[in-house]
Amino acid sequence: MKRIIVATLLGMVFGVVCYYFAKSGGGEIPAALRYQIIGSRALIGFAIGISCLNLKHWSLHGLVLGLIFSIPLSFSGMMAENPDFSGEMMFASTMIMGGIYGILIELITSVLLKLKQK
């Protein structure tokens, strides 16, 4: 249970980080999108916390789940109107950051705090 709580909270923290990255590009971010960003990253943490997939290494586990659970946010990112990024760039960057957040969540949860999968 501790693993689920810690991983979900880490996902929320990285969601806030992701929101501030998105906000730094200028322009106002609607509240609904802010909650979607934070919720999507929290979902990555929750999925990592409850997952019992055996992918042989913690980093691969975090990467795969980070990528899978970033797909919905990536598609909504394609609809964003940003003159600096094309829709494809938004999709790719959201997926890449999701993979990185997944690895970081798994690193902190499994390696640093030693809350291993069961």
Image (cartoon, rainbow, N blue to C red):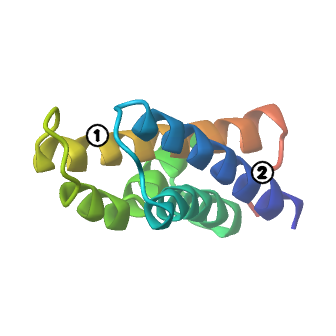
Q: Residues within 10 Å of mark 2 (few under 14, many from 20)?
A: few
Name the residue at 40% across, 46% down. Answer: 28
Residue 76 seen: yes
Q: Secondary structure at mark 1?
A: helix
* Residue 95 position in % (x across, y down): 32, 48
Name the residue at 70% across, 61% down. Answer: 49
**Front-most of residues 77 and 92:** 77
Left or right, 86 with respect to 4, comes to left
**Front-most of residues 76 and 9:** 76
Q: Secondary structure at mark 2?
A: loop
Badge 1 is on which residue?
93
**Residue 34 against residue 1 in the figure, above or below:** above
Please tell me which of labels 1 and 2 falls first in the chain: 1
Badge 2 is on which residue?
116
* Residue 73 position in % (x across, y down): 36, 61
Left or right, 61 with respect to 107, comes to left
Left or right, 77 with respect to 31, comes to left
**Front-most of residues 63 and 100:** 100
* Residue 14 position in % (x across, y down): 60, 43
Q: Amino acid at mark 1?
A: Ser
Q: Amino acid at mark 2?
A: Lys
Which image quarter: residue 22?
A: top left
Left or right, 99 with respect to 49, comes to left
- State which quarter of the image contains the N terminus: bottom right
